[in-house]
Structure formats: structure tokens, C-alpha cells
Image (spheres, rainbow, N blue to C red):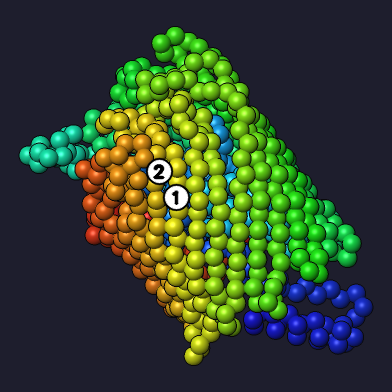
Amino acid sequence: MWRARAACACLVLLPWSAEAQTADSVYTLPPVQVRARRPAPPESIRRLAGQATAVAVDPFRPEIANTAVLLERLPGLSVQNYGSAGGPATVSIRGAPPAQVRVYLDGVPLLRAGRGLSDLAEMPFASLDHVEVYRGFAPPGLPGSTPGGAIHLVTPPLDPGSPPVRRAVAAAGSFGAGRLGWSQDWRLGSHWRGLLSLDALRSQGDFEFLDDNGTPLNRTDDERTPRRNNEVRSDEVLAKVARPLGHDGRLDVFHQWVRRSQGVPGYTSFQSSYAQQASTHHLTSASLATPSWWRARLRSRAQVFFDWRRDTFADPASEIGLGYQDNRDVSQAQGAHLETSLRLPVWQRLALHLDARRESFLPWRRFPAPQLGPEQQRHTLEAAFDGEWLVWQGRARLQGTYRLSREDDRFAGDLRTPYSKRPAVSGQTTYAAPRLGVRLRLAPGLFLEGSGGRYHRSPGFLELFGDGGSIAGSSDLASETGINRDLGIEFDRVLGGLQMGGEIVHFRNRADHLITFLPQSQRTFVARNIGSARSEGEEYLWHLAPAGPQPRWRVDGHYTRLRTEDLGVDIRWYAGKALPGRPQHSLYTRVALRLGGATLGYDYRHLGENFLDRWNRDRVARRDLHGLDLGVQAHALQLRLAIRNLTNDQSRDVAGFPVPGRTLSLGSEMRF
């Protein structure tokens, strides 16, 4: 603030000073540095008729982090980790399988048919501005039906008028973890703006864990052993250019490149020493928002994208899977999205969304004999009609979406696995997915929200055909269908000088032919249909802080109680059992203090016990994780020390994989 006042004083006194000096005098003013708070995520999602959370991302915090670390702190989300820092991780929302959770990057669907589920470790992190999580009603502008919720990763909106920023980060931590990152944006002429972001993460992951040697009932042979073959190397590059076109028009083009390589250590016992997997991913997108027409009532947006990915898996010693493996699979996706919205006095807004996608999967296998293909394809056409209107003198907002989709599967060859009864069948499938949501203002700062809808999801190529390694597919899988419902109350107001708020939500979902990955052995997971299942529970969210732009302290957190039930439609003796991999209790809370240029934070995370099998015999014990972090800001330099898992809890993750104990990281961030 004092810098801004000094600059204003200089501008006022400058003409008077110039008159007192000679005409050829030249004065150089010191640079003026303007600091402002990071802009909050868009408030538009708070008006959505359903439960949603938006979190601003500062990816260049001086720590070893990725998208998985960010999401595991959000309400209703359960992150399953399969290794060390930067290792594979998937996410579940309200007990839905990870394959049901759609992930998007600037509107482009990252959950492709080629993989079937998204690995959070491969999601961009260093180039993000904020993350939007839709636990119930998802915007129709995000293509595809979202039975398990949606996660939208958003890169920074480039404004040609803002000053360029250059940032660098370096961090190191336990178990050989380290991170280097660099980001810079430029003015490209008077209208264009460019961004380049680079990030590299490394981890050895050689932590110790308790190995039961495959005999969980015999404690005499348990021993502590280091995790082997668990190293991770990840590199990310994102380049983006943007130009405003006037009257809310905008052109954005970006390209993302991600390269990863990692060891495949196996489940717990019988660790592998040589199995390796790697991936290379390219994603290019161009989005054009046309200038608004007809007194800003008519808006249109078009987007095209091309997605290419290569996955390799090598198991030269036959340690994982069904013998010697050397696989190279290529997945591609091309698509286009077109939307037009019209604002009217009565209906408020009507919109039409059209989507077309072509996805392909080309496998290459060396075992039992070198073979390329055959290529598997899926063509999808979608049309979504969206309406939003205000009723009851503007106190109630209603939103409705009707999505009509047609999928054309073109499968070739007989790629059945030992776990399949028949090969995958080609053909067309047409289905409708209606959704309805409401947001009612009961009082200032008090809202009632609810939504419900029907969904359909076809199995992905990974679920159908597997990867030839630790994941075995089932080519005879049926498509998932189901109904999701939720109802909640949201409160957010300033009372007594405190900004306080919270949510209480009840949800109830049913899925038929639910697809889930079940342990088949110590080394292999197989995709299976569960006839019918029900998930229901409650979410409690809270936040409390002094009112003002920069509060000196803040408390926030969430608790989720989840109850799942296998209805036993396909195998009746499973009726009443809990679904595997879904903790009944999940709690996260954080307390943060700001003391001058230093910040101190404490967080606590609790995960209740859960099961690994449908029979509910193999249990994963509860976990209680405590963390501390200390940050110090000195001009353009920031230092941060973080300790996770203070009590060295070395239980297993919800999927049964061993996870690290106490970890430390120290990092620095520089702006220049």
C-alpha cells in the first residue's frame, strides 16, 4: 500500500518539479511494484444447483506436491495412492469407482476410453490456476455423463494487460524426492499473451514397510523391508497463448506434454525388481469464444482437441502378470465441442451443447508372439440441452440438463483374457442422461441445494482388455447404469467479525453392473461387474476465519460418512457386504496462522478401515495422519518446511498398497 501511495505522490509532484528544472533534465523514477491477492476461483460455480468446490492453486509453493496431494484434502474425495511422492494415484468421489470420475483440463476430457481411469500423477499441476470439483450436479459444458462427479483443472487466464511474472521453485525431501520448476509468461505484441511452464519431479520411494510375506494370519514371518523398484520420474511442459477478441470474445491455444517412467514394485509381498512402465502424453487444444451478440444475450464457444498417448510395460523376469511382457499401447482421441447459449428474460438461459469424439486403442504385444493390433475404436456423438431459470422472485434457481448420447464400438479380433467368458462385442448404444438441480435461498447466506439424475457409462478399453501387466481386463463387461441424488444446506455469512460457513449434505446413489477392480492375486487386479450396489452418506464442511482480505488465522475441514452395500444381485451371498476400497469415515481439518511474514499450519487426516475384497475378509486398518508446515516470506523469496505423517503411521492405503511413513521436505520459491 505504501508503494502505491508513493507512486501517486510522485505523479502529483512531477509537473511542479519539471518547471523548476531545465528543459533537458531527465529523471528516472524507481520501479513501482504492485502486490495483490491471488484472484479467487470463479464464483459462478457457487450458483450451480448442486454441491461444488473451487480451490485456488498455487503450484509453485516450495514443496513436493502434485494434483493428488491437492485433491486428497477436498471434501467427498478419497485418493488412493500406489507408491511414493509423485507415484500413481486415483480418486473416488462419494464412493464411486475412479473410472466414474471424469477429469477435464480446460474443458477437454482427460478420462479417455483408452485408459478407462485417470492417474492423478499424470495430471498437470505446475500450470494450474484453480481446480473445480463437482460432487453432484456437473455443468453441461463438460462433455460426457459424469456418474461419479467431475474434476475440472483450469489453467491461468492470460490477460495482456497484467504484468509478466517469472517464478522458479526447488524442493527436496525424504526417500530421494526432489522437484524443480520454472514458469514465465510474456506479452506477445499488444494483444497476445504467452505462458510456458516446466516441472520435473523425482523420487526413489525406498521407504521401509511391514511385509507379511503373503501370510497375514501368521505374524511370526513379518519383517520390515525397503520398498524396491519404486522410483518415479515425471516431467511436465505446458505452453499456452491467448488473445482477447473484444465483447467477451477470446482465443486460447495450449499444448501439454507429460513424460513419466516408474518401477512397478508390485502389491506388498513378492516385490518385483525389474518390472517398469512408462508413458508419454501429448494434448493440444484450441478454444474460441466468439464475441457476444444481440446485446450480450447470445454467446457461442467452439473447441477442438487432439490427444495422443503411448504406454509401455516391461516385465522381463515375469514378476508381474501372466508371464514375460513387453507391451506398447497407443491411445488417441480427437474431438470437438460446440455450445451456444441464449439469455432470455423469463427462462434466463437456454443452451445447446454438441460433442463428437473418436477414440482408438492400438496394442502391441511381444508375448506370446510379436503382434500389432488390432485397433479398437469408439465413436461418440452427444447432444445436451441445458436450461436455467429463476423462480419465486429470484430466490430459487432451477437447472435442468438432458443429454442424449450414441456410442459406436468397433472392436476387432478376439482379445479375451483368461478372466473373460466371451470377446467384446461391437455395436451401437444410445442412452439418455437427464439431470435436474435446484438452489433455493432460504435467508441471507443460507441456501438449500439438491440434484438428481440418471447416468450411463460404458467400460473403457483398459477395463475390457487390460494392460498385459498388473491389470487384467474382462472383455465381457456390461455398461454401468444408475441414479444419483443429493440434498444439502449451505451457510456462509459474516457474524461478529468472523467469516463462517459450512455445508451439510446427504447423498444416495445406486449403480447397476458396477465395474470395480478386485485383487485376483498378490500381483494382479481384474475388472469385474458387481450386479448392483448402493452408496449413501453425509458430508460436513466447515470454515472459520476473521473477516477481511488477509485473515491472520483460518480453520477449515470436512468429514464424510460413507455407507456402501453390495446388493448381491449377481452373487446373492455377497448381499449386505460393504464395497471394497471405500472407507466408511474420512476426516480432514487444517489450522493455519499468519505471523508477519511467516505462516504456520497443522493438518489432521483420518481414514477409517475398509475392505479389499467383496467378502469383507481382508481389512485395511484405519490411518491417522498429522502434518506440520512452516513458511517464511522474505521479499521475492519464500521458504517452506513440511512434515507429513508426524506419528510415522505406516499402515496400508485404502487399496492395500504400502505407503511411506514420516516424510520431510524443504523447498524455496523465487519470483523475479
Q: What quarter of the picture does the N terminus occupy?
A: bottom right
Q: In this view, does 608 lie above or below 420?
A: below
- Residue at far left of view: 220
> What residue do we see at 53% from left, 84% from top?
494
Q: Position of residue 122 (x, y in %)?
A: 50, 42
Q: Position of residue 325 (x, y in %)?
A: 39, 19
In-front residue for pair 67/450: 450
**Residue 411, numbered circle:** none
The answer to whether mark 1 and mark 2 are in CB contact below 8 A is yes
Q: Give the amino acid at mark 2.
A: Ser
**Residue 532, numbered circle:** 2
In-front residue for pair 404/45: 404
Q: Where is residue 44 in the image (x, y as percent from the top left)?
A: 65, 66
Quadrant of residue 554 within the rendered picture: bottom left
Mark 1 residue crowding within 10 angstroms, few (<14) / some (14–19) / many (20+): many
Q: Let me know if residue 571 appears in the view.
A: yes
The local secondary structure at tag 2 comes to: strand
Q: Is residue 147 above or below residue 328?
A: below
> What residue do we see at 71% from left, 67% from top?
389
On the image, numbered disc 1 is attached to which residue?
A: 510
Tell me: 209 left or right of 423.
left
